Image (cartoon, rainbow, N blue to C red):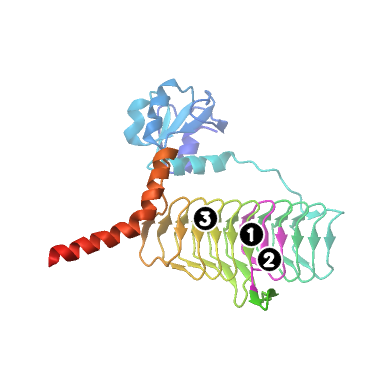
Amino acid sequence: MKLRDIANAIDGYCQGDGDVEIDSLAPIRTARANQLTFVANPRFRLQLSESHAGAVILRKSDIDAWDGSAIICSDPYVGYAQAAQLFNRPPLHTAGIHPTAVVASNADIDESVSIGANCIIENGVHLGSGVIIGPGCVISEDSSIGEDTRLFANTVLYHAVSIGERCIVQSGAVLGSDGFGNVWKEEKWIRVPQLGRLIIGDDVQVGANTTIDRGSLGDTKIGNGVVIDNLVQIAHNCEIGDHTGIAGCVGIAGSVVIGRFCTLAGGVGVADNITIVDDVHITTMTSVTTSIKLPGTFSSGTGLMLSQPWKRSIVRFRQLDNIVRRLKSLERRLDK
């Protein structure tokens, strides 16, 4: 593919030879003459002088560090993502049902659907046009999957789960399982049936081994354009707003409402029955124990430091309450 064609496709413009042939993308250090790379962070500018890439996607302000052909765009990382889509060639799937798959006679399956080996498709399931179901998936009764959605191998949908169009669900995800509903009585747990559903919007991505529980009363809802990383737990009755991003190992307890355009970085924990407004960004390993009512970036915990200073800091942290009491006592004496 010619460089100028790539530039046009990603809303950039060429500087240098637009006829350079590009056949793939590569990291800046290993890129060859037939490959395209990018610089989104200024700290990588220094590596440009040693790169053998055929061309680079970069900002206009960084062009002085590169004397070869380039694509200039306002956000090189977005440009890279768009260029990568041009070279992404996933394996083709032929429409049809593998002979080892078990499909209920009353399942509504479009003729363009591809169903892999050892799948189970139960009663009342609807699969829209262009849906791809990978090997070993289980789609339980009365579930619905919209057009052009793909489930990778060994994904499990419990009953009455609804997934929208153009979604991607990675291997091992479990969608619509029972939430953690139990009541303690007389020295034993009583299970609370989970009577709601799980509803997932359009253009959603769900990572590998992520679990999203169905609602207990009412439904768990994942909005349009939400992206969810691997190993995320979303509990019953949560509502995730459109275009929110959730990174790996996040745990969200029950009945949490998260607004639109939020981001939760890796390892964030959210307590139950919390509301988070739109445009909130929560940094890595933050513990969210109260509702967030204003947009912004929020953090908790302490950053990395050497072990011995950290241990001394922990001792001082435990002394804070006593220090505050003593300080208030001194202030009262001074006010007299």
Residue 196 visible? The answer is no
Give the Cα separation between the discs numbered 2 and 3: 19 Å
Q: Which segment did they paint magenta? A: 156-182
Which residue occupies 72% across, 66% down?
158
At mark 3, the secondary structure is strand
**Left or right of 42 in this view: 34:** right
**Residue type, label 3:** Ile
**Residue type, label 2:** Ser
Give the Cα separation between the discs numbered 1 and 2: 8 Å
Q: How many numbered circles does the render carry?
A: 3
At mark 2, the secondary structure is strand
Residue 194 against residue 36 in the figure, above or below: below
- Which of disc 3 and disc 1 is earlier in sequence? 1
- Which of disc 2 and disc 1 is earlier in sequence? 2
- Which of disc 3 and disc 2 is earlier in sequence? 2
Instruction: Depth check: give the residue in front, 200 or 320.
Output: 320
Marking on residue 237: none
Magenta-drawn stretch contains 172: yes
**Residue type, label 1:** Thr
Which residue occupies 78% across, 52% down?
116
Which residue occupies 39% across, 40% down?
309
Mark 1 highlights which residue?
211
Give the Cα separation between the discs numbered 1 and 3: 13 Å
Instruction: Depth check: give the residue in front, 11 or 137.
Output: 137
Q: Position of residue 272 (x, y in %)?
A: 52, 68
Which residue occupies 24% across, 63% down?
328
Instruction: Depth check: give the residue in front, 15 or 83.
Output: 83
Marking on residue 177: 2
Q: Quadrant of residue 140?
A: bottom right
Marking on residue 246: 3
